[in-house]
Image (cartoon, rainbow, N blue to C red):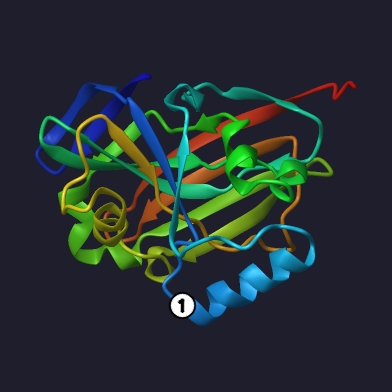
Amino acid sequence: MKLSFKAEALSGSRTIDVEISSLVVAGWAGRDQHAIEHHIEELFAIGVPRPSSVPLYYRVAENQLTQASRIQVVGDQSSGEVETFVFRAGGELYVSIASDHTDRKLETHSVALSKQVCAKPVAAEAWLFADVAEYWDELVIRSYIQEDGERVLYQEGTLASLRPPSELISGFAGQAELPEGTGMICGTVGAKGGIRPAASFTMELFDLRSGRTLSHSYYIEILPEVA
């Protein structure tokens, strides 16, 4: 999947075209093992299978990546999750944001399939990872949903609650560097008020030190679920 990003670095900005041939979703990527286990038990109680390992790396078809402002889903039981998205281009690691949009109904049958059937929206802007690596834990991810005609804060938290990209990359690739052509979605924070579907989803990555924000919005078109 060919994506184009406006890549911003302290040295300036430029447009880069990236060919993503491998997409990985890092699940159960939190740092607090007790909190992860509690969440696993909560989901298991409603029918979601326990992960075989933590963190767990789900492979998703690269053609599910999209920078469009609309996605189509079957049925009304899917929802988004804001996550950082890292990729390597020209020997440099970049960070953007993506939504691990997931079919929650299918999730009780297979987490891997529930991720595969939904498009993964990605922002059209990215930052040079090296520019924010020193204070990575301070960066904030957040999302908003449209609910009853109102814009509602759905998720918010610092990246300190999630495993750093270097750890996730090493766990998946067995090496320090993410291979060229691989994109990784790196984990999310809890939803305020519980996981639920919405008509639209807005996601942000905020850098308090520089005041910069990466953002992307998309709306969800529901296709009929027919037998």
Residue nearest the observer in this picture, 96 or 173: 173
State the residue lying farthest toward the right. Answer: 227
Question: Which of 142 and 63 lies nearest the eye of the viewer?
Answer: 63
Q: Eyeballing the image, is 227 above or below 118?
A: above
Query: Which of the pair 30/11 is nearer the observer?
Result: 30
Residue 97 pos. (x, y %): 42, 42
Type of amino acid at the residue the image marks with label 1: Asp
Q: Quadrant of the image for the C terminus?
A: top right
Task: Look at mark 1 in the image and give the residue it sits on.
Answer: 32
**Mark 1: secondary structure:** loop
Residue furthest to the front in view is 52
Q: Residue 59's quadrant in the figure?
A: top left
Q: Position of residue 181 (x, y in %)?
A: 25, 29
| Furthest-bottom residue in this view | 34
Q: Position of residue 204 (x, y in %)?
A: 47, 46
The quarter of the image holding the N terminus is top left
Instruction: Determine whether 127 is above or below 62 in the image.
Output: below
Q: Name the residue: 66% across, 29% down.
A: 219
Q: Is residue 65 left or right of residue 135?
A: right
Q: Is residue 113 left or right of residue 62?
A: right
